[in-house]
Image (cartoon, rainbow, N blue to C red):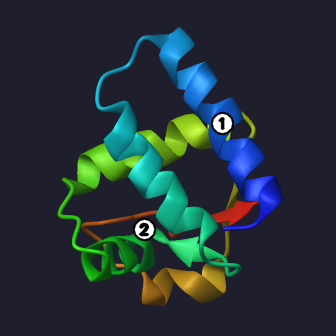
Amino acid sequence: MNDRNILEKANLRALLETDQVDRIQDRLNIVDTFLDTEDHVTLEELFRLLKKKGYDYDPKFVRQCMNRVVELGFAQRKQSDCCIARVSHAAAPHGDLWTVQ
C-alpha cells in the first residue's frame, strides 16, 4: 500500500469513527482490498479479491461499505454498458464499478 493509500485509509477510519458505524476493521479490510488494485472493479471482482485474502463478507455489507466510501469521496462509482455483462445480476444489477478517485 502506498503512502497516499495509507493517508486515505487513516482519513477514512476517522470519518467512519465519526459516523459511529460498527465493524470498522471489516470496513477497512474491504477498503484495503479495494485500494490494492489499480483497476476499476465490479462488486463481483471485489468479492473475489476479498475471498482471495480469506475474507467472507456478506455482499450486502460490501455494497453498503463501498457506497459509503463513495459518499465520503474516497471512490467514484462509474456505470458502463460494456461492463454489465461482467457483473453478476445478483451481486450488482446495475453494473456498478468503483475506482480510486
Looking at the rendering, which quadrant does residue 65 occupy?
top left
Three-letter amino acid code at the position of disc 1: Ala
Disc 1: CA contacts within 10 A as few (<14), some (14-19) or many (>=20)? few
Task: Answer left or right for 75 relative to 27.
Answer: right
Which of these two is toward me, 13 or 72? 13
Query: Horizontal and vertical percent for residue 70?
Result: 64, 42
Name the residue that disc number 1 marks. 10
Disc 2: CA contacts within 10 A as few (<14), some (14-19) or many (>=20)? many
* Figure check: 55 above or below 29: below
Three-letter amino acid code at the position of disc 2: Leu
* Figure check: 57 above or below 45: above
Which of these two is toward me, 37 or 81? 37
Query: Horizontal and vertical percent for residue 69?
Result: 59, 41
At 64% from the left and 44% from the top, the residue drawn is 9
Let me know if residue 54 appears in the view.
Answer: yes
Name the residue that disc number 2 marks. 43
Tell me the quarter of the image containing the C terminus: bottom right
Query: Horizontal and vertical percent for residue 29?
Result: 41, 54
Task: Answer left or right for 25 relative to 94.
Answer: left
